[in-house]
Amino acid sequence: MSRHDDIKLLRINYLRGPNMWTYRPVLEVWLDLGELENHPSNKLPGFTDRLTQALPALIEHHCGVGERGGFLQRLVEGTWCGHVLEHVVIELLNLAGMPTGFGQTRSTSMHGVYRMVFRARDEHVARAALTEGHALLMAMINSEAFDVNAAVGRIRDKVDDCYLGPSTAAIVAAATDRRIPHIRLNDGNLVQLGHGARQRRIWTAETDMTSAIAEGIARDKDLTKSLLKSVGVPVPEGVAVKDAAEAWEAAQDLGLPVVVKPSDGNHGRGVTLDLKLKQDVHAAFELAEQHGSEVLVERCIPGNEHRLLVVGGQVVAAARGDEAYITGDGTHTVSQLVDLQINTDPRRGLTEDFPLNRINIAEDAVIALDLQRQGLSADAVPEAGRQVLIQRNGNVAVDCTAQVHPEVAHAVSLAARTIGLDIAGVDMVSTDISRPLSETGGAIVEVNAGPGLLMHLKPAEGMPQPVGQAIIDHLFAEDENGRIPVVGVTSSKGGQHITRLVAWLLHLNGRHVGLACHDGLFLGTRRVEKRPSAQWEAAHRLLMNRGVDAVVIENDAASILKDGLSYDRCQVGVVTDMDGMDALADFDVKQPEQLFKVLRTQVDVVLSEGATVLNAGDARLLDMVELSDGEVLLYALDGANAALQAHREQGGRAVFLQGGAAMLAQGASETSGANIDALLQRFKAARINTDAETLLAAVAAAWALNISAELISAGLDTFVPELPH
């Protein structure tokens, strides 16, 4: 069989916001199939069998058939390789742990050239999946070997490098469920929830309400204990020591057994438990000294380690830890038995996706010390039947939220409040969390800022807890969604005049307004950038600005095709015309129906409580009326416009020109809203070209924001067409 030439990837474009394909970011790829245009899947001998053997789960893909096995049916009947590549990439993403369901492939006006898109939460991950999918597909077409597991591994590595950690992702998912928008602010886990002045920020499980003082207290375990003790929270007795000899003296004074740990360590590093012998205390001191600035010796509390998550003063989740043991067989070493009996547990792994960590004796000095206390080493062979303790802590992954006694919850909540943390992971030792600490002799041993959430999201045993939702409910009241009014104006001409005028009217209405348009970037009445700012980056910066509580953004068809919209949803969306198609040839938009699909993006993102503003004077836009989730306002120069009249008869709002003034109408009611002619004269005097239809669009958008007719009139009278310097 002769080798088929590779599919050419002509153009790869990341659409970062809502676009003509979907509400969410996608990777758009222009493909040239070349001679494969003449070889659909059913004309490639053995191809379908090779592909489904490499990716068996393709049978789960519904495709256009709408049911399981739909894509397989298309493969057998014959489908083109661009469509196949779409499904291959999606399946590789699924296998790499980033579930993806959306994809489309459409032909272009050029022979053999297709546009393929697929959902892309992260651009780098999407590009990696495309690279691997392209290589896999060509290997299957040409009957060549391909290592699918290695390809999935490379994509998974990219996911680990680039995507949000599981704790942050859970919080973001909970925000999305409440329709709260989010913006990732760095390559890590710093995320903005909401927009502008109504935003909140998280960094994993820390928030912008997390006090730096409280964090500092939590890092100092000795200070934490003294504060907790002062408010009556049970804590283990303990003292700070300077050397190994002093550690042993303290252990004798406190009463054996004891715990030795660093004063400011974390994740259990350098913590050795249940120490009874002088040499063990000395060794534990040397270990703890490597992990903190000071060493503490504490009375050892009987029981299991527990981690309780406190959010906003309430205990929302609890997990219990279990000790890890191996059983000797007289043949294998301790190290081998750990791999055979503990690390084979599918719940253990090296990444954050696993609720339990794999145990590596060679890298854990605490385990080595515990083995030494049992007269063993990693290379020792324990006799058959002997129980060997491997790890005392670090296995906190058994959900016990439902078992927490109210008095335990009260003590834990008080501990978090005493330290001053809005979100805290409280470590407690108790024999039974369903009984008060006074009965079990339990105590709180640490309070941690920025706690990990994975043990509660994916416990090794028990039910997952909705901790992401608890954090979102803590940050946002039930009736809050973090949104500020966003006005999006999509126009091929005069868009900057509409947006400047709407921003001015919002300013008069008491808003701190950000504006991005072809005339520049504005904060309030001040122009902070003179270069055209009707682009994704500039508009996006406004949504990140804590100083603005309303944003007005100009878009055009080219910007939607290049980047998508800079906002996920908007309060008011304006579409003024379907002109300017000549400038879109590079995007293969050559027919009115194609342009319509691009421009409707602005209408698709209008919130249900918002409004769409359409130019009834352009009959081609009227089909967008049915696409709006919110109210629809129509405007036209002629009040007798048939669509305008029909809209008013149904109780809809409309704006039209009468006697040089903008009329605001709803049903039979009409109110004069602004002197359009006078403002046109001021534009003309400033040598700026605009027209009455453009100004009517601004009036309609302002009315859609429920700005009063009186303020609209005053705003047009005081608007200055000249740009500030």
Image: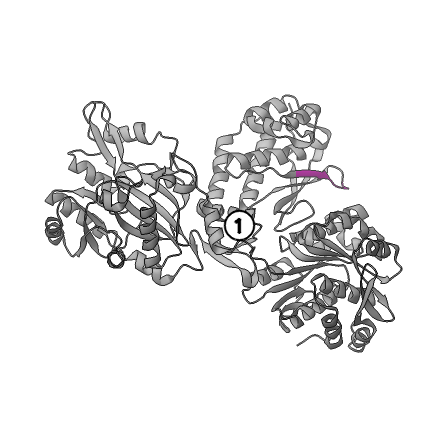
Tell me which corner region of the image, top left, top right, bottom left or bottom right, holds residue 502.
bottom right
Residue under pointer 1: 175
| Near-viewer residue (654 or 262) | 654
Q: Neighbour class for label 1 at 10 Å: few (<14), some, many (≥20)? A: many
Report the amino acid beneath label 1.
Ala
Could you say which is closer to the camera, residue 467 or residue 32? 467
Q: Residue at x 51, y 31 (%)?
A: 148
Q: Camera-side residue: 129 or 339?
A: 339
Could you tell me residue 722's position as x and y percent?
A: 72, 76
Residue 224, position as x, y percentages in the image: 27, 57
Could you say where residue 53 lies in the image, as x and y percent from the top left? 56, 24
Look at 13% across and 52% down and name the residue there. 250
One can see residue 77 in this view: yes
In the rendered view, does 478 fall on the left or right side of 377?
right
Q: Where residue 459 appears, x then y in whole percent? A: 40, 37
Residue 519 sits above or below residue 13 on the image: below
Quarter holding the C terminus is bottom right
Q: Quadrant of the N terminus?
A: top right
Say whether residue 105 is magenta: yes
Task: Please give left or right for residue 683 compared with residue 355 in the image.
Answer: right
Q: Which residues are magenta?
A: 104-110
From the viewer's side, name the closer residue of 518 and 281.
281
User: Which quarter of the picture shows residue 481?
Assistant: bottom right
3 is higher (above) or lower (below) than 300: above
Q: Is residue 691 visible?
A: no
Q: Is residue 440 left or right of residue 605?
A: left
